[in-house]
Amino acid sequence: MASGKLSQLIKTLAVVFLVLTETVSPCHGPGRGSGWRRGTRKRTPLVFKQHVPNVSENTLGASGLSEGRILRDSKRFKDLVKNENPNIEFRDEEGDGSDRLMSKRCKDIINSLAISVMNEWPGVKLRVTEAWDDILYHAKDSLHYEGRAVDITTNDKDRTKYGMLARLAVEAGFDWVYYESRGHIHCSVKSDSSAAVKVGGCFDATGHVTMPDGTSKPMSEVQIGDHVLTVNENGQKDYSEVIMFLHRDDEMQGFYYTLHTGDGDAITLTPSHLLYITDSNNTNSINPRAVFAKSAKIGQYLLKSDSQRDLRPKQITKITTSWKQGVYAPLTKHGTLMVDDFVASCYGVISNQNIAHLAFAPARLLYNINSRLYANSATHELSQNGVHWYAELLYRLSYYVVDQRLLFQH
């Protein structure tokens, strides 16, 4: 069986797997039920002047701060992409094609929205009335100047559709959607440099993992097929194979939380990444749980491997944030790993470690099949770059399948 056919097979299995797991209850799900949605989700149109999320556009929880205007002679102008999608109608009132220019993330999401519009209203197309703009009549920090914002309608200009259009835009993945006026919906996205970490938690380039010979390796040098120190399902330290990267990009800038402990050690990871904490330093009654890095609090305890390689609770004494270069999210067979000797999950975005690990069962199956078929040849993808298609698929489907209370809120 060819590797390409295996990839197609696993895509099919992934969709089937997620559909089937809508009706099952993982035994370790939090609270009542499993966290998986049941039945068909009812869409609710946005109302006039409503925006999702319910925070300001330029906050971290929405599309984030402006990174500065992009003019035609700006160095960053080359980062804009032209959208030639025939399923989208562009007003182009300037007559220079500028309404087709946008950031890559904005293009990807609006192309997805165009499909949703055609599915919702057969014969109707999405219409873009404004995208990137270098005519300075918007607000000073408008994301239109960076190609990160679009104003949209339907091409039949039926205003009764606009509330549902806004809802479809939310579901398509826009980071901020605003029913701004009776005449259009305003949508915007995070910058390309910060948005990609949304599909999963990541570590920066300086984090180190431990190899079987006791040496450490920086995250930027970890490869698929490496065996690294992890914690297994029984809470015991074990070496587990790296089977893929959920996300890997040497050049991307990521927004990180650094959790510092009293002995001067620290772990750095994105806000949406899971790591293990406990509320007590009593080694006889450690009951660790996985939480988002953003949710960890000063006074709680991280689990750290000591010189004897036992796990000891270390109190968080300080939390700092920063932008750092490089984003790395290796996935091991165990679904955990030790980074700078602290216990962390391989997953992010969803707050339940067990559900996340279950969702990646098809990826582990594919890796095992490939390993058996090509045991004597170098077939593993050692230089993966960008977001892995399977991680992206799960993120896209999570809106429909997973209880939103389990998902990271930006």
Image (spheres, rainbow, N blue to C red):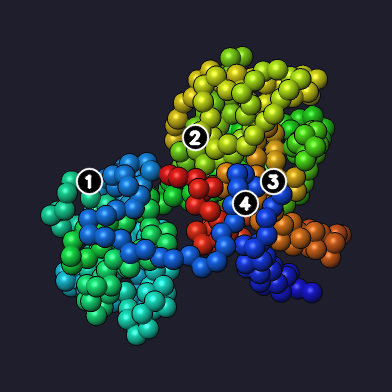
Q: Nearer the viewer, residue 50 or 222?
A: 50
**Label 1 sits on residue:** 141
Q: Does the rendering let one see residue 28?
A: yes
State yes or no: discs 1 and 4 in contact (Cβ < 8 Å).
no
9 vs 116, left or right, is: right
Give, as a three-letter code, the residue at label 4: Gly
Q: Which of marks 1 and 4 is nearer the N terminus?
A: 4
**Label 2 sits on residue:** 294
Q: Residues within 10 Å of mark 2 (few under 14, many from 20)?
A: many
Mark 1 or mark 2, which is nearer to you?
A: 2
For the point 73% across and 70% down, the residue is 6
289 vs 99, left or right, is: right
**Label 3 sits on residue:** 28
| Secondary structure category for the residue under label 1 | loop
Task: Give the quarter of the figure containing the N terminus.
Answer: bottom right
Q: Residues within 10 Å of mark 3 (few under 14, many from 20)?
A: few
Q: Earlier in the sequence, mark 3 or mark 1?
A: 3
The numbered dot on residue 33 is 4
For marks 3 and 1, give the CA distance: 45 Å
